[in-house]
Amino acid sequence: MNVVTGLINGAISGATPILLAALGGAYTFYAGVFNIAMEGMLLMAAFCAVWGSFTFGSWVAGVLLAIAGSLVLALIFIFFAVFLDTDEFVTGIALNIFTLGATTYLLRQSFGVKGVYAGPGIDPIPSLNFPLVAQIPVVGPILSGQNLMVYVAVLATIASAFLVFRTRFGLRLRAAGYNAASLDSSGVPSNRLRAYSLLLCGVLCGLGGAFLSLGYVNLFSENMSAGRGWISLAAIILVSGNPWGVAIISLLFGFADVLGLLLQSYQVPSQFTAMTPYIATLIALYFYARRQRKERDYADA
Amino acid sequence: MTDHPSPLAPDLIRMRAIVKVYPPNVLALDDVTVSFDDGEIHALVGENGAGKSTLMKVLYGLIHQDGGEILYQDRSVRFRTPGEAIAAGIGMVHQEIVLVNEYTVWENIVLGAEPVDWLGRIDETRSRQQVQAIIDQFHFDLDPDAQVDDISVAARQKVEILKLLYRKVSVLILDEPTAVLTPQEIPQLFAELRELRDEGHTIIFISHRLEEVLALSDRVTVLRKGRLVATVPAAGTTRAELAELMVGREVLFTSRRTPQEPGEVVFAVAGLRYEDGRGRVRLKDVTLQVRAGELVGVAGVEGNGQFELVNAITGLLKPTAGTIEVAGEDVTAAPVLERRRHIAYVPQDRGRMGGSLPASVVENAIMTHHRLNAELVRWRGLLLDNGAARRFTDRLAEAFAVSMPSRSSPLRSLSGGNQQKVILGRELLLDSPFILLDQPTRGLDVGSIEYVHDQMLAMRGAGRALLMISANLEEIFMLADRIVVLHRGEIVADVPVEQASIEQIGRYMLEGNDATL
């Protein structure tokens, strides 16, 4: 495997959790929910995945528990922000901070360790090999041999684009974000669409979190989501939620991730290299803001 | 003037002894009994706060009555949500249009009742066909594929109506549908509504424009302060009679403007031009003068440069070219505060530009004065003199007949009319030679409108120069000495009111310089 293939595969791995979380967040973005809880959902899912995989000895149980854990957070979000109409930002912050504390505590209680748990009993999510595809020169080693969750993410992108832009659900979902009053007066409660979007976000963040702890690596460490939920939020805002755009931006972030790792081998301190995804975020935001400003001038006209 | 005495007419909807209390103790509807016949156009009129919208929201299931009963097709009904009302055949078009601007006409119409295939995918062909079929049936002139963003307000209103027709409603409630239309668009709406009635629909029409009510409806129900005053047949009822029922006293509709020779030029803009960030010309060589003791009315369809003109005058926007002079001083580049020494300004949006809704009446009353009036501050402006501020507010409340719970109540707790009195009073007490009024009576009830008009005419009598922007041509014709028409950022007409007709001004508003007379 040459360096370029390695880089691309690294970027894909780095992009997958961001992509899954961002697709989830895209639903809430379209529904008009200011949802910043992807970070917490990813982390909760990552922990539940390891716990489930270890306890039941099966990655399937891990993934299911990851989804369940993430959904619990989504339900809490729905109860407060949709049902009780509390501030979405504050609710999201609270969930994120709660999850950080809760997973740290649960790690100690369940495994009796601090910081990291990486026991041999954790069953990882398998990779899929397509022997024929793998033979194809150049792209073969990229298309084949990826973790199952990578393919799930690709399918989720296609499904999301279909769901959002072509279906009845999508028309209503976007209407909830564009003009909730209009949807309500059409006889469809916009709050119901908000709740659905958060549930979808919970499921997708569950998959993303499971990939983090059972695919990307095979362990759980405190705060292992490490800002990926925030980066997914940036990706969503940059492309206004479009699933295809989200996929491209996630790949760029994944690439920044790999770049960081690569720089480490050139003696750049790891604290600096760890910054690259966030610097990439700021750069992306700069270009986004410039475009927005142009559009605003345009709209004022 | 008695209740409609036709026992033979088929009551489609009968609302009996409806009571609605808004917490804590506002009696919005007090024992209102009214019935709507099958296939009639029935107008609901009343001042703001009379309860017309509340009554219809009760019927539509948006809010729920605290007492009384609704019979629909002889069955007692209580709709929990608008969705249930629509399913039963009653639909409402609200005053503010709520459509998804990002969607096309057909997408908006089918939203919530979309034809889909087995995958949940929207069946575009079928949707378009169904929408086109209703458009054709009622002769609405509309392109189903147009994006709502790109169509006129009148067309958007049609989309709202079509949305209900698509859901097969037989009763249409329209809340002030003409408020957003130009004079030319109203007859078309009325023709469409009559056609709907003739096809068997029942139309309930909320309005406070009495001449429209009389022109369109079969019967009129008048509400005042939450109580039913009367239901009268439109034929044979005069505007003055309706107004008297509405207000409870006689209302004068004729202009009270007395002829008066204007004095010196107080306000002058010359060659004013504004290009936005995209290079589009929003104001084009606007030249305009207002003299002392003169009231100039600016007519125009909204979005034809009124916003830019007002903002250029108040200093919120920097014109590309041209000059603005007030009282002989060039203020083209002056900062806002400097302009405020010469310009009183009543913005169209009381809650955002005009004042601060959560702030107290006192705070709203002294805004701007606290910078210009030395009596309100101590220590060279470092400290507010609260006592002086309160006295000033009392003076304002007294002079402008503001009714409020207390001086320290938030502006929000006042009625729209009283909010406007606070802002109008504050601006007029600035004693500026030039007064700019942007839609000064928008959203006010008849009584408050009369009051605001009186104050404006008093200022004109006192030799101030007034420039009023209004979407209401009738208002302009009642008050203005001169009418200026803005069309695509350009002044296309500048005529003394005596030489102008509503039809002619309306044509200028729509067609600009192409208007053939």
Image: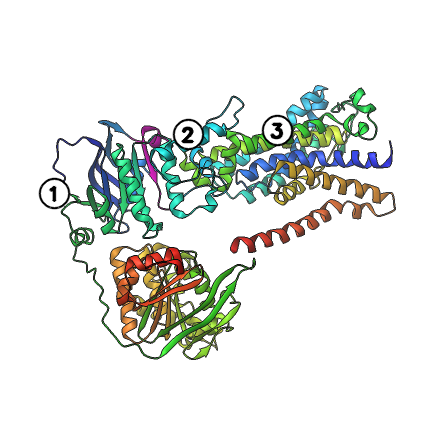
* Residue B350 visible: no
In percent of the image, x 51 and y 61: which residue is there? B281
Chain under disc 3: A
At 67% from the left and 21% from the top, the residue drawn is A61
Report whether mark 2 lies on the same chain as mark 1. Answer: yes
Q: How many marks?
A: 3
- Left or right of residue B108, residue A41 in this image: right
Secondary structure under the numbered disc 1 in the rendered image: loop
Identify the element where label 2 is drawn. Answer: helix
Relative to A151, is B293 on the left or the right? Answer: left
Question: Distance from label 2 to label 3 (Cα)?
Answer: 28 Å
Q: Say whether residue A216 is left or right of residue B284.
A: right
Q: Amino acid at mark 2?
A: Gln
Q: Would you say residue B322 sits in the magenta stretch? A: no
Q: Nearer the viewer, mark 2 or mark 3?
A: 2
Q: Secondary structure at mark 3?
A: helix
Which amino acid, mark 3? Ala
**Alpha carbon distance from label 1 to label 3:** 64 Å
Distance from label 2 to label 1 (Cα)?
44 Å
- The dot on residue A159 is 3
Whether the residues at callouts 2 and 1 have beta carbons within 8 Å, the answer is: no
Which residue is the site of mark 1?
B2
Position of residue B236 measured from the top left corner of the image (x, y, whole percent): 13, 47
Residue A232, image x and y in percent? 66, 40
Q: Quadrant of residue A106?
A: top right
Where is residue A97 shown, x and y percent of the image? 63, 41
Rendering coords of residue B83 (x, y %): 37, 32
The quadrant the N terminus of chain B occupies is top left
Few, some or many residues within 10 Å of mark 1 (<14, 14–19, 20+)? few
Q: Identify the residue position indicated by label 2 in the image.
A: B130
Q: Which residues are magenta?
A: B78-97
